Every structure is written in C-alpha cells, then in structure tokens.
Amino acid sequence: MRFVWFFVIFAGMAVSFSLKSMSKSPYAKLSELELNRVELKGGFWGEKREQLWKTVLRYQWTQLESHNDVNNFRILAGEKNGVHLGPVYLDSDLYKWLEAACYVSGKHPEDEWLSARISELSGLFAKVQMPDGYINTYYQSFAPERRWTNLVMNHELYCSGHLIEAGVAHKEATGRDELLSIAIKLADHIDSVFGPGKNPGVPGHEEIELALIRLYRETGEKRYLELASHFIHQRGRYTRYPQALLNSLKDQSELSKIVNEKRAPYLNKAPKAGSAAGYIIGGAVFDPRIPWSFFSGKYFQDDKPFVEMSVAEGHAVRAMYFFTGATDVYLETGEAQLLESAERIWDNTISKRTYITGGMGALPVIEGFGRDYELPNRSYTETCAGIGSFFWNWRMLRATADAKYADLMERTLYNAILPAISLDGTKYFYQNPLASFGHDQRQPWYGCACCPPNIARLFGSLERYLYSESDAGIWFHQYISGSAEFKIKGQKVKTNLESGFPFQGDVKIKLNMDKPGLFSIMLRIPEWAKSVSVSINNETISKEPEPGTYLKISREWKDGDEIRLNFAMEIMLIESPPEVKNNLGKVAIKRGPLIYCLEDKDNPGINVHRAVLLKSQKLSSELTSNFPGGVVLIKGKTVNGKNFTAIPYYLWSNRGPSDMEIWIKAN
C-alpha cells in the first residue's frame, strides 16, 4: 500500500491551533451539534437505542405508574382520588423519564404511545402548576405554605431543574412549546424568589444550575444565566453549618408530622415520613467521618466557594452536577477562575479519587468521596455519579478541546454507566461495586429510583456527545456507528461512520458533500490505543498517531472521501497505583475501552477473589455468541494452571447471583 503525506498535527493537552466557538456558548472551543443533525445507526449503540425505545421507556413507565410518580400529579390535578405517596424528590424521576421520552419521540414521531404519554404529562403539569409558576406535588399536597423553607434537604430546586431540562428537551427534540412554557413559568418564579436582594439560599442538591443554563441557551433570556451564576458563586459563602443542617432536620420533622396526619385517613397503615437525622447520626456506625461531612457542609459542597476548591468532596452526584453547572457558567461568561478551579478539581479527583471504571464515590451513607486513594473494591460508585461525571467531562471537553476528557467519557460510559442496566433493559444497579460476594443484584426499581431514568435520558441524547464543530473543522470524539451533518465554511458536510467498538477497533468514515472544501478533521486517538493505522482513500498516513490526543488532518476534502482507522485492541494488565493499599499486587484486565472482570459463572473451580494470574503469560481473546450481539472474552491461566475466562465488566450479574472481581492478584 502506498504512503501519502498530509498536513497532520497531533493535538493533545495543549491545542496549538486556534479555535473559535460556533455555538451559542461564546467561550466554548467546540460547539455541540443539534440532536436532529445526528443519527445513531446500527452497531452496538444502535441496538441499545432500539432497546431504549421499544423496551426501556415502556418498562420504566409501568414502574413510574406503580410507584405513584404519575398518580401524585393526577391526584393533585383532581383527576383521581387518593393521597400523595412517596418522598419529596419523587417528581424528579418522572421528569427524567419525560426528558428521555422527548428525545426518543423526536426520532420516532410515529410512536403514538410515546406521544400520548408526553401529552398527558404536559396536561397534568399545566393543571397543577400554581399561578405564580411553582410546581412540586409533595409541597402542594401537604404544606404549600412551607415551600422554599428547607433548601438544604428537601430537593425543591433539584426537582425544578429536572422539569426545566425536560421542557428544553421537548423543544429541542420536537420543536413544540407546551412543556417549555411550563418550564419558563417555573424558572421565572424561581428567579423572582432567589438571587441578590432576595432569598439568598442555595439548593441542597445541585441541578437547577445546569438546567437554567440550558434554558438560557434555548431562550436567550439572560436572567437565567445570571441566576445560575449566582447559585454557583453563592455556594460556600452563605449557608452556615452546622446550624443550617439542624434547622433543616427540625423542619423535616415538623413537615413529616403534617404529611403523616394528612395521609392517615387514606391508608390503613400510612407509610411514615420522617427526617434524615437518624440516617446522618447512624452513619457514624460505618464511619465517624460521616456525620462531620453533613454538619460541616462538605456533603453538600457548601463548605467553601467553588473557586477555592481543589478536589471533589461529599456526595458524588451533587459534586458532579455542581461542577457541570460551574463549567457551564464558564462557557457562557468566560470567567477564568471557574475554568481554573474546574481543571484543578478534575486533576486531583480523577488521579486520586476515581475508580478504574470511571466510577466515583467510595463511601456508603454519604454516597460520596473518601480520602485520596481511598478506593475500596466494595465501592458505592452510584450510577448517577458516573452520569454526572460524563456530563461534566463533556463541558470540560467543549471548554478546552483536550482529548483526556473524551477519553474519560468513553471509559465512564462503558464501565461505570453501561453496567448499571441489565441486558434486557429491565433491571438496574444503583451501586456498581468492583467486587461482589454474590449479594449484589440489579433490581427492577428502587424507592429512590434516580438512576434508571437518568440512564434513559443519557442514552436518549447520546448523539449530543459524539461530534463537534469548530472554525478549524470537524471533531470525532466517540466512535459510535451513525451519521452526522456539519456546517463547515459555508457548506454542509455529511459523514457516515461505521464502528466495531467496543469489541473491534475498525472504524470507517465516509464523507458526502456537494463540492470540495478545505478544512480539518480531528480524530480522537484513545489513550489505550498503542497501535493505530489511519488511511484516506486507501492511502496510509505515514506517521504513528499519539494516544490520548486528536489527530488533525488538513486537506481539501471531496465527496466520497473515506477515512479508515484501525485501533489495535491489545489486552493490557493495568497495575493498581501503590497508594491504593487494598489493591497492592493486583492487576485489572483491559481491552480497548472495556474493563474486564472474573465472574464465577465462567470459572468453575476457581475462587475469583483468591485467583492469582501469571503476569508474564500472553492472554488470548475469543469471540463468543453466548451473550447477545457477540462478545469478546479473555482467556488465560492462573498460577496453578487452571484456565480462567474474563468477561466485560458491564455484563456481570446478568445470569443470577455471582461472585465477581475486577482487581485480580498477580504473580
């Protein structure tokens, strides 16, 4: 095969060429593509999206129906007799499902069932929304006079944020305004209550910040950006702990009495509402640091301002949403301190407090971060924390054009988020441990069911995270089969991408355009890809691309041009950092973007917790049809000569209770 030279630049942590945003975010180096300009087609993720549409959304709706999420709105609207059931944050699960449904409905407008569900919910929300814009079924059902009085613990702003995001998603995906008008009315109410010279409080669970930014980008109303910025900067400056938490717990106790009294006439045995005081104090049984995390404000990321933070602390999901919102504010305002702080926090958190899977959150009870390198394999690693990390890294990627953020997105998607949903789409992990002794099973649903609909809304909007545009040209971040339409230097460029990921490293990209054009294409070279070949129209680029960077190819492109990449998916044994004491002398198996594990189902006669691998051996890969779609297994021997099989971590616990290990002893 002939070799041909093109103008090729490797762009890594420091991007040497000038980038100017083409998006609505003036300080973003990379712009998002609208969802209607991207399609997922075939391949691994095409099948997942088909399952989301035909199975997951319908299954989750039945769970929401049976767990009172929908009935609480029907009762409040006067369409059904009964009483509100469920916790104060229950509305948010329905809003997240609705956001996912809007994305899928935009791709499948012919789905009458989905359209009917969206229409019903839009009508219910319009009926129950108060004249001033407020909406929260818990407070409206039991104590509307107490609204906005317990920001620390009671999730009103969190729920509001998810409704606003659903409203924006509906507009983005379908072009319709019904939900957006409800979201705007709610946001206007929140803006009338909070901000300088008004209620100075901040939400106990972050989410409203990134929702307000999304609404600002959709409407151009600057008040929403200003309020989001206020919430980011006010955090760590206003709330006074521990007194604020004590007041919040007292309020929870008083509100619980009201709730229990109003529920009693409707139920023979009313489920008791209560405060979190026992939960917080009882946490000391697990770890004496846990009550301090709450009473210091660290749990809420409310102990110091964002610009003074150096590492993630406290509740992992809250932290990821907070950092996402702060980075969003930077993308709109260019406030340098915000990006500097985000980069500092990212460097320390990813290197010292993040699992090899991309999962976050070592400690139970606080569902959050421990000390540096405190990464027990019986981890908490909540699914929503992985999703929050994915969202944050997308903002960091847009802000910097640094491939390390896209690399972490890939690792997190396949190894911290995907494992949380069963192969049939109807069972879910809340926690994602790296070791199991047979007691961990995905569940059909949870009393706190934040994770299942969060998975659905991410999978429903996956197109958003695959590509970007800039003045320089086209960026390929994730190699997922599909098509995209770009607007580059005055003309449309369509691409069709075929990918073998996550099991095969072959990628083909074909360009369709009306006339030739001079621009650049940036191709992410994953950090795990130690051997890569790249060709254009069967002519091989002579330089070896550098892992963990973007390969920039500048030339005059024409209709029918074809780029082929092959990423060698070599089997790697990853040694644990020596600072992680519980993993000394252990390795994890990685192939391509996937982390592997030993599960006892494939290894009869082997105790997966005590197995010892011979590091010097050459492990082999084998394609099997034992799992849907075909899966690559890894084979090898233990030091005592027994054959072992490793499976991708995302597949474990799909065949009943099992023992499992990611970190394996090695000789």
Image (tube, rainbow, N blue to C red):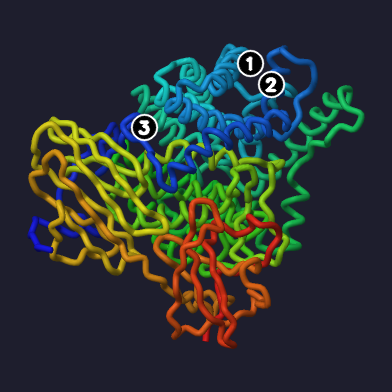
Q: Amino acid at mark 2?
A: Gln
Q: Is residue 345 above or below residue 146?
A: below
Q: Is residue 206 above or below residue 15?
A: above
Q: Amino acid at mark 3?
A: Leu
Between disc 2 and disc 1, the foreground one is 1
Q: Residue furthest front?
A: 625
**Which sits in the foreground, 505 or 585?**
505
Residue 192 pos. (x, y %): 50, 21
| Residue under label 3 | 35
Give the Cα distance between marks 3 and 1: 30 Å
Residue 594 seen from this side: yes
**Which sits in the foreground, 133 or 436?**
436
Give the class, few, some or many, for how many residues have Cα within 10 Å of label 1's Cα (few <14, many ≥20).
many
| Residue under label 2 | 140
Horizontal side of 55 relative to 221 (left or right) equals right
Give the class, few, some or many, for how many residues have Cα within 10 Å of label 3's Cα (few <14, many ≥20).
some
Give the Cα distance between marks 2 and 1: 9 Å
**Badge 2 or badge 1: first in the primary sequence:** 1
Residue ID at (57%, 21%):
113
User: Are the residues flagged by discs 2 and 1 in contact, CB closer than 8 Å?
Assistant: yes
